[in-house]
Amino acid sequence: MLKNAGSILLLLSLGAVLPADRAAGQTPTASKAEAILDAYVEKCGGRAAFEKIVSRRTTSTASMSMLPAPMDVTTVTATNGRFHTVIKSASVGTVEYGSDGRTVWEINPLVGPQVKKGADEHRFRLFYNLNSLVRWRETFKKVEYLGEATVDGKPALKVAAAVQDDYVVTFSFDQASALLLMMESPVETATGRSVEETRYGDYRRVDGILFPFRQVRKGLGPEMTLTFKTVEYNADIPDSEFSLPEVIARIAGGGK
């Protein structure tokens, strides 16, 4: 594990020492991107620590300027891409997102039940995946260093990462700490493709792993701030928690 910020900065400036089979054919931008991602994993607790994690339960409040009161959010995630989020709002009602590892879905009182496809599906899978950035070699088919940037006044290093069908997200990592500051995710809207920004902060260590207790999303309507109250790793979550709701199962199966 990297012990201090100086070690991290040295790694980021020099690039990672790659095994010969990985170094072959690597471009300098790909090698530096790998070094940045590996530094992030080490800073957050190291791959070995994350490999022991099979589930996570979080509770948080979500605040939006357009709503008079914050919303209560509960999210459970598990291996194999499974997740389930329940958002309870006195103004809107209950909104749910989820996946059984195959189908990604949403039930929203404003738009009804939906099965997510395309950019929306990829965005949800990456955002709610248990350890997509820790297992970035399995998650992404290509990573590339894009250069330096500034995020909320902090010098950052930008990395582009593509999943199998060329859905590309951009990560910005703090140069001083190696922690993730922002993720930019393409989204499809009624007027065309846009970008959602998710900014991360207030990192705290839970069971030896750093977790961002403050997340701010903007780009799709009003800005939303998530403030986490509890984070529990290896929570006891029954498989039924990830089962498709009946209405979603009908849509996914071609029914109405």
Image (cartoon, rainbow, N blue to C red):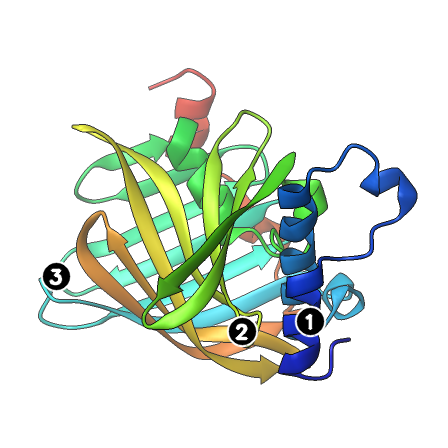
- Is 209 situated left or right of 165 in this image? right
Residue at figure coordinates x 89%, y 48% from the top left: 19
- Is 50 situated left or right of 48 in this image? left
- Foreground pick, 122 / 177: 177
Question: Can the viewer see residue 79?
Answer: no
Q: Earlier in the sequence, mark 3 or mark 2?
A: 3
- Foreground pick, 132 / 235: 132
Q: Earlier in the sequence, mark 2 or mark 1?
A: 1
Which label lies toward us, 3 or 1? 1
Locate the C terminus by quadrant: top left
Write down the residue under mark 1: 10
Give, as a three-letter code, the residue at label 3.
Answer: Ser
Residue at figure coordinates x 58%, y 70% from the top left: 178
- Foreground pick, 29 / 39: 29
Give, as a three-letter code, the residue at label 2.
Answer: Phe
Q: Secondary structure at mark 1?
A: helix
Q: Secondary structure at mark 3?
A: loop
Write down the residue under mark 3: 91
Write down the residue under mark 2: 211
Residue located farthest toward the right when viewing the structure as drawn: 20
